[in-house]
Image (cartoon, rainbow, N blue to C red):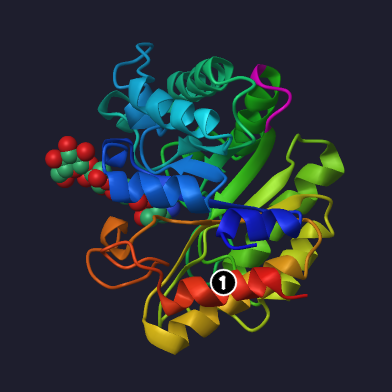
């Protein structure tokens, strides 16, 4: 293939990007989006604060702009994210107990029902595990409603959109030897053994010098897949530049291609200037929309083998 999407499709995968609704009027941005990608994730527009700014008053206009653009272009959509400790609307941030649990479940039901049939996979729960050596859940208002909040979230999502794949999504879960990776692995193992509806695990894959692409990445992806879930790289970006960055991108693509249940890769933005990172050059296109060395190495990795 000559584009990321075409080459990924030849390998039975998709290639996606995060999209910001307010950039859909930028012709350079949209030109690259339409040419190179066949999966999109709303960067912010489908999160809790965006979709339920006031309790029980839902707002889907910006999410719809992204979903409609994707569907008109024949691209699929990853829904991001139904339940998260961060980017909660103000009204939710100080809630607790049964009221918060019910508000979360209502949010999941309403949003997943609204987008029913249009979503390939939902990030049902995002970033629920703690960093560091504990391997435990992260403290949050949602966690304090009871340890079963994650499975309750997955059951509500399944009831609302039975055909969407339901994923758990997190960062710093790439290195098999990290406690956080092990904690998420044990949760997925437990969910599968008890029949909690989970179909996939997303690895955000935000890499930098302190958190490099691990040499055991393939092992991590394969071990999760062996639990009976699909795996995806969901928010890929890699700090750095030039051939070093290009090689790291190539390693990520090769790790996914080596795991049959790794169904696709999404980068977290199009041009370096679109990145959430305040500085740096972590993406595949430069600020002018030119292909970088990292782009060429990703494309050639997709096309070899
Ligand atoms: O839209 C408002 C604008 O009206 C306001 O003037 C401006 C001033 O701060 O803020 C704008 O909102 C910002 C929003 O991005 C849109 O640009 C928020 O402050 C800012 O916090 C928000 O950052 C997003 C971040 O998630 C929030 O947690 C990033 O764009 C987004 O890339 C990032 O994405 C996350 C994933 O969802 C989960 N995994 C990690 C990843 C990177 O942090």
**From the viewer's perspective, is 85 left or right of 178?**
left
Residue 14: image location, x then y, percent:
64, 51
Residue that lies at the very extreme toward the left in this rendered image:
278
Q: Regarding mark 1 in the picture, which secondary structure is present there?
A: helix
Residue at position x 61%, y 19% in the image: 116
Residue that lies at the very extreme toward the bottom in this rendered image:
243
Between residue 179 and residue 173, name the one nearer to us: 173
Residue 280: image location, x then y, percent:
27, 73
The crowd level at tag 1 (other Cα within 10 Å; few <14, some 14-19, many 20+) is: many
**Which quadrant would the N terminus be assigned to in this image?**
bottom right
Between residue 67 and residue 30, name the one nearer to us: 30
**Above-or-below relation of 177 to 28:** below
Q: Can the viewer see residue 186 in this picture?
A: no
**Residue 162 on the magenta span:** yes
**From the viewer's perspective, is 290 left or right of 266?**
left
Residue at position x 29%, y 44% in the image: 27
Q: Label 1 CB, ligand 1: below 8 Å?
A: no
Residue at position x 76%, y 43% in the image: 191
Task: Find residue 93 and report its image quarter.
Answer: top left
**Above-or-below relation of 257 to 166:** below
Between residue 271 and residue 139, name the one nearer to us: 271
Residue at position x 64%, y 74% in the image: 301
Residue named by callout 1: 298
Residue 103: image location, x then y, percent:
45, 20
Q: Can the viewer see residue 168 in this picture?
A: yes
**From the viewer's perspective, is 200 left or right of 51?**
right
The overriding secondary structure of the stretch rendered in magenta is loop
Task: Find residue 279 and report its image quarter.
Answer: bottom left
**From the viewer's perspective, is 82 left or right of 48?**
right
**Residue 277 on the magenta span:** no
Segment tinted magenta in the rendering: 160-164
Residue 196: image location, x then y, percent:
77, 35
């Amino acid at each position: 293939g000559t584009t990321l999407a075409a080459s990924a499709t030849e390998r039975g995968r998709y290639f996606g990007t995060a999209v910001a609704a307010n950039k859909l009027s930028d012709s350079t941005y949209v030109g690259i989006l339409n040419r190179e990608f066949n999966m999109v994730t709303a960067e912010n527009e489908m999160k809790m604060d965006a979709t339920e700014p006031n309790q029980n008053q839902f707002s889907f206009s910006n999410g719809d702009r992204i979903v409609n653009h994707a569907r008109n272009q024949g691209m699929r959509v990853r829904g991001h994210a139904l339940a998260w400790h961060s980017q909660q609307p103000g009204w939710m941030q100080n809630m607790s107990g049964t009221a918060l649990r019910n508000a979360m479940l209502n949010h999941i039901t309403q949003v997943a029902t609204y987008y029913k049939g249009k979503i390939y996979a939902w990030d049902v729960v995002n970033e629920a595990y703690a960093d560091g050596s504990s391997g435990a859940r992260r403290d949050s208002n949602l966690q304090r409603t009871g340890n079963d909040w994650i499975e309750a979230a997955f059951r509500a999502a399944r009831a609302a959109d039975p055909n969407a794949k339901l994923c758990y999504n997190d960062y710093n879960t790439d290195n098999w030897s990290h406690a956080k990776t092990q904690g998420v692995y044990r949760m997925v193992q437990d969910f599968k053994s008890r029949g909690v509806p989970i179909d996939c695990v997303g690895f955000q894959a935000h890499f930098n010098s302190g958190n490099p692409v691990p040499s055991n990445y393939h092992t991590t992806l394969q071990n999760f897949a062996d639990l009976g879930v699909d795996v995806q790289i969901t928010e890929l970006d890699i700090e750095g530049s030039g051939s070093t960055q290009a090689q790291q991108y190539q390693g990520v693509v090769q790790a996914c291609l080596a795991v049959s249940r790794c169904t696709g890769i999404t980068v977290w933005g199009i041009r370096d200037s679109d990145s959430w990172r305040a500085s740096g050059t972590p993406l595949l296109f430069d600020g002018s929309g030119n292909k970088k060395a990292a782009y060429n190495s990703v494309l050639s990795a997709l096309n070899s083998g």
